[in-house]
Structures are given as C-alpha cells and as structure tokens.
Amino acid sequence: MLALLPRLRRFAYGLTGSIDEGDDLVQATCERAIRSIDTWQAGTRLDSWMYRIARNQFLNQIRANKVRGQRLEVASIDHYTYVDGARAMEAQLTLEAVRGLAARLPEEQRSILLLVCVEGLSYKEVSEVLDIPMGTVTSRLARARATLKDGLDGPAAPEEKTSGSLPE
C-alpha cells in the first residue's frame, strides 16, 4: 500500500484539484482500505482496488458537499512567486488552463482521463477499476480529450460549404 501512495496522491489531486483535499482523500482512502482489507481479493490488483475506493470516497464527498454547501479555499501566495521567464509563464498558464478545464469535466470523464493519461492505466484496467464497459471508457476519454482540446485551442470552426453554390 505504501508503494501506491504517490500514484494514489496524484490521482486524488487530479480529482479534487487541491493538494490539501487530495491528501485528505488519500488518507480517507487508506483508512477505508485498512478497515475493509478483508474485502480485497488476494491475487487481484491492489492499485485498482485503491483507485476504486478513492473515486467512491470522492463521489461521497461531492454528494456531502451538495447537502452541506460548498466551502471556499484559501489562495496560496506561493503559487505566484516562482515565474522564471516567458516560457515558464506560458507553461504555467497552459497548466492552469488544463487544470481548470479538467476540473470542469464531468466526474466520470475526469476520472478516466486521470487514470489513463496521468496514471498510465490501460483502457482495460480502467474498465475494471471503474466497473464499466471498455467502450464507455473509450468514448468518455475521447469526449474529455476533445473538451480539453477545444478549451485550449478554441472550438473548431465549422467547415464551409465546398459545393459551387453561393451562400444564401
């Protein structure tokens, strides 16, 4: 379980968008896993089981926030103190744009995007972790990627008519 913590933390941060909330999610995930270790089947992938627990914990927190209301996060000044030139600034702006766009994705798309693109799981592994068909993984990932691309590049311009007729 200890060897999985860096990957689990990265996944939790991607889900929550906050280091502090991500760490809280990892802690809650580990607590749940330890309490429920008897439900883990020996010979199956521990990482898949832990990702599933983390995702379920996250969904439970979203539901709880809807009942209790959203809380505001304190901004950190450290985030803005390390700009080193135009290239670093552009990279930082792009990263923030991607994070913002990913945070607005529906949870089912964001989870798949994180598991495939950040954690490196195969489509089949994600299908098993989330207990959904592989075709669903593929379509949700494609929609997530398209949304990110459109958000970064702007939506693609509609194709103009190529026939010889004049526009009306």
Image (spheres, grey):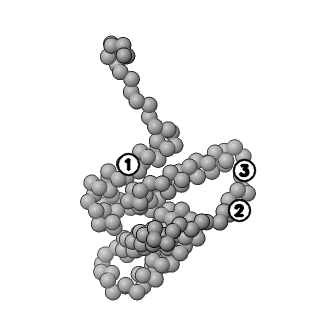
The amino acid pointed to by label 1 is: Arg
Q: Which residue is mark 3?
A: 84
The residue depicted at 45 percent of the width and 71 percent of the height is 67
Q: Which residue is mark 1?
A: 143
> Looking at the rendering, which quadrant does residue 129 occupy?
bottom left
The residue depicted at 50 percent of the width and 57 percent of the height is 103
Q: Residues within 10 Å of mark 2 (few under 14, many from 20)?
A: few
Q: Secondary structure at mark 3?
A: loop
Residue 82 image offset from top left, x and y in percent = 72, 56
Between label 3 and label 2, give the one nearer the viewer.
2
Gap in Å between the C-alphas at discs 2 and 1? Answer: 34 Å
Q: Secondary structure at mark 2?
A: helix
Q: In the depicted view, which residue is nearer to us: 3 or 152?
A: 152
Q: Is residue 8 visible?
A: no
Q: Which residue is mark 2?
A: 78
Name the mark on residue 126.
none
Gap in Å between the C-alphas at discs 3 and 1? Answer: 34 Å
